[in-house]
């Protein structure tokens, strides 16, 4: 259904054909026809308050027509997942870091991450083989967001403001064909497929990041004089 190519600092998800992509990505936000969704890995030191992420990323694009997201998470940690419900398939690709995590409704000061965990974020591409109206695609994207949030909450990352529900820089891009499908909520096969694919893959990605963070902290502690 999709082809994933890793060539750090880029991660490329090639769609089966040009599709309508909905996202709030730094490049290609809103509704956009595209056949590729990109990740660009950057260094933690680049992510400063004055960094023009959108302008810089647009100038770096190997495919100007793609939708592109930005992360300081190692893109080689990406995970894939699929789910099929009543003949409808959803596929997703996830990179996840939680070091700039937030609990929704109460934000933390900027750059609260410690040196053991960098400035990770969550980036997700979802591809659905059902044809939807624009309104239904917005509903489908909301299901992907719910699945992301449920997986992060289940990870149990405690913050001073509460349990983490996401990060301050999460981005999700959802691709499908344009069509007459009017609904894609939790009662639908499309919504179930999206939710299952994203929730399972995000659950694995969160577990991987938590294990990575603990290993990094243990190594830093071991190196302390």
Image (cartoon, rainbow, N blue to C red):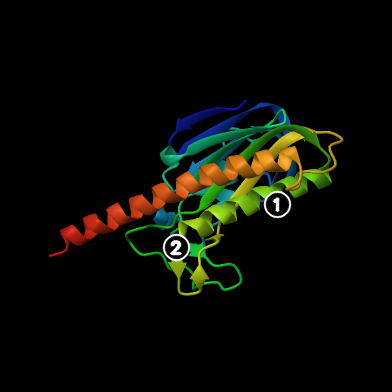
Reply above or below: 167 against 201: below
Compare residues 182 and 76 and report the one nearer the observer. Answer: 182
Q: CA distance from mark 1 to mark 2?
A: 22 Å
Q: Quadrant of residue 175?
A: top right
Which residue lies most toward the left here? 225
Residue shown at 60% from the left, 32% from the top: 63
Q: Position of residue 212 (x, y in %)?
A: 34, 50
Q: Quadrant of residue 178?
A: top right
Q: Position of residue 225 (x, y in %)?
A: 12, 65
Compare residues 203 and 179 and report the one nearer the observer. Answer: 203
Q: Residues within 10 Å of mark 2 (few under 14, many from 20)?
A: some
Compare residues 196 and 98 and report the one nearer the observer. Answer: 196
| Residue identified by numbered label 1 | 142
| Residue identified by numbered label 2 | 157
Q: Position of residue 177 (x, y in %)?
A: 77, 32
Q: Quadrant of residue 111?
A: bottom left
Reply above or below: 193 against 148: above
Q: Position of residue 214 (x, y in %)?
A: 31, 56
Residues marked 1 and 2 touching at CB (< 8 Å): no
**Quadrant of the snapshot with the N terminus:** top right
- Determine the secondary structure under disc 1: helix
Q: Is residue 216 visible?
A: yes
Q: Does residue 156 appear to the left or right of 126 in the view shown?
A: left
């Amino acid at each position: 259904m999709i082809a994933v190519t890793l060539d750090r600092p880029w991660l490329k998800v090639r769609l089966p054909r040009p599709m309508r992509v909905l996202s709030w990505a730094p490049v290609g936000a809103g509704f956009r026809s595209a056949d590729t969704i990109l990740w660009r890995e950057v260094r933690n030191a680049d992510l400063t308050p004055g960094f023009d992420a959108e302008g810089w990323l647009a100038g770096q694009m190997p495919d100007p027509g793609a939708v592109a997201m930005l992360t300081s998470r190692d893109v080689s940690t990406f995970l894939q997942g699929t789910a099929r419900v009543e003949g409808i398939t959803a596929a997703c690709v996830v990179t996840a870091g939680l070091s700039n995590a937030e609990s929704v409704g109460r934000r933390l000061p900027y750059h609260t991450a410690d040196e053991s965990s960098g400035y990770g974020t969550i980036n997700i591409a979802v591809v659905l083989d059902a044809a939807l109206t624009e309104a239904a695609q917005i509903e489908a994207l909301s299901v992907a967001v719910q699945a992301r949030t449920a997986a992060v909450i289940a990870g149990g990352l405690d913050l001073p403001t509460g349990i983490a529900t996401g990060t301050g820089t999460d981005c999700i891009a959802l691709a499908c064909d344009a069509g007459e499908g009017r609904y894609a909520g939790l009662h639908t096969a499309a919504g179930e497929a999206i939710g299952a694919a994203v929730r399972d893959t995000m659950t694995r990605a969160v577990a991987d990041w938590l294990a990575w963070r603990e290993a990094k902290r243990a190594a830093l502690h071991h190196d302390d004089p």
